[in-house]
Amino acid sequence: MSSLRVLQRLQTTGSAPPAASSGSWSWIVSSCCRLRTGPGSEPRRGLSVSGRGTMNVFNREMKKRQKNWAACLQDGHQYDYLRDEVGSRVADRVYDIARTFPLALDIGGGKSHIAEHLSKDIVERLFLTDVSEKTLRQRRKSEILTHCVLADEEFLPFKDNTFDLVVSSLSLHWINDLPGALRQIHQVLKPDGVFIGAMVGGETLYELRCSLQLAETEREGGFSPHVSPYTAVTDLGNLLGQAGFTMLTVDIDDVQVHYPGITEVMTDLQGMGESNCAWNRRSMLHRDTILAAAAIYKEMYGNEDGSIPATFDILYMIGWKPHESQAKPAKRGSANVSFKDLSKIGQPTTTTKS
């Protein structure tokens, strides 16, 4: 039985997504790319571009295998509902900026979930990157001239000051060196270019996390992490500022999806290519633990109709690369109105005639 999905506070409009293109495929790399070739050019795992050490939390090779596996599913399109919705919301933020972008970059764009919601009047040319070749081969058609590049989000193969716009949707939460990745995005942007991104963060899947931990503690005397760690919304603004972005905007959406049971939750995560790939994960769950987790999930979080919710916290971010034309903050001490005068606003004023 296919899982029932009811998105609270979400109304996904439009027709079903178009089928994957079966036409000719070509890898297009323009002069703005400097691709690494040869065995000696492979980037070292766990190191940022700047050469400084970083936490090595995720197995990036496993994440690529997970995404390739998900892309091979015959019914893979039925797991794209979350990416489609978030991609449309990122596109809405692009439309909010009243300008045309001659050259844009979509990092970890997968099947092009953002570009299908954009028009060529807004973005004239797009570079679509992803770590999974099989996912890129299933990209959806759009009216924007698109070039596909197989590239890791942690090591962008583009020259500095290349793009007018960089977007990313539901990809950055699997990066080991998020500060380094944001610095690279800042570098490839032109001055006065803008970065608009969305990533999973906050307390995402806390229902699944708590249920598995309680069940594993009860049945096995301890628990292991089965849901990957996520970035807190309170840290995102600092990370963008440290990367060099200005005029920052950070907001969060809580998306709830309803499923028949815990098995459907984990099946859909696997179909999305969103299974845990942390190095310290456990490779398997015992059957008794899963049954106990399913009972705990329904008891603690279940709805009256028998379904269970899964919460996704989507963090949205907008940052600009500095340029002399941008508005500058006023100098400290230049204000000519005191905060204590705010209480006088709206009070009647008296005038004296001489």
Image (spheres, grey):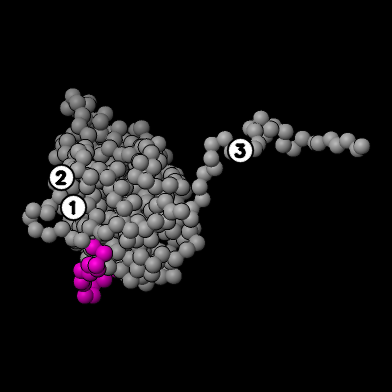
Q: Which residues are magenta?
A: 18-33
Which quadrant of the structure image shows residue 243? top left
Query: Could you tell me which residue is drawn at 86 percent across and 37 percent down?
Result: 351
What's the CA distance linking mark 1 and mark 3?
Answer: 53 Å
Three-letter amino acid code of the residue under disc 1: Lys
Question: Which of the two labelled residues, at mark 1 and mark 3, occupies the earlier sequence position?
Answer: 1
Determine whether label 1 and label 2 are within 8 Å by CB.
no
Residue picked out by circle 3: 335
**Closer to us: 199 or 262:** 199
Find residue 122 and name its label.
none
Find residue 64 and name its label.
1
User: Compared to 212, does 157 lie above or below?
Assistant: below
Determine whether label 3 and label 2 are within 8 Å by CB.
no
Q: Is residue 222 left or right of residue 115?
A: left
Q: Residue furthest left?
A: 39
**Between marks 3 and 2 in the image, the one whose residue lies nearer the viewer:** 3
The dominant secondary structure in magenta is loop
Find residue 45 and name its label.
2
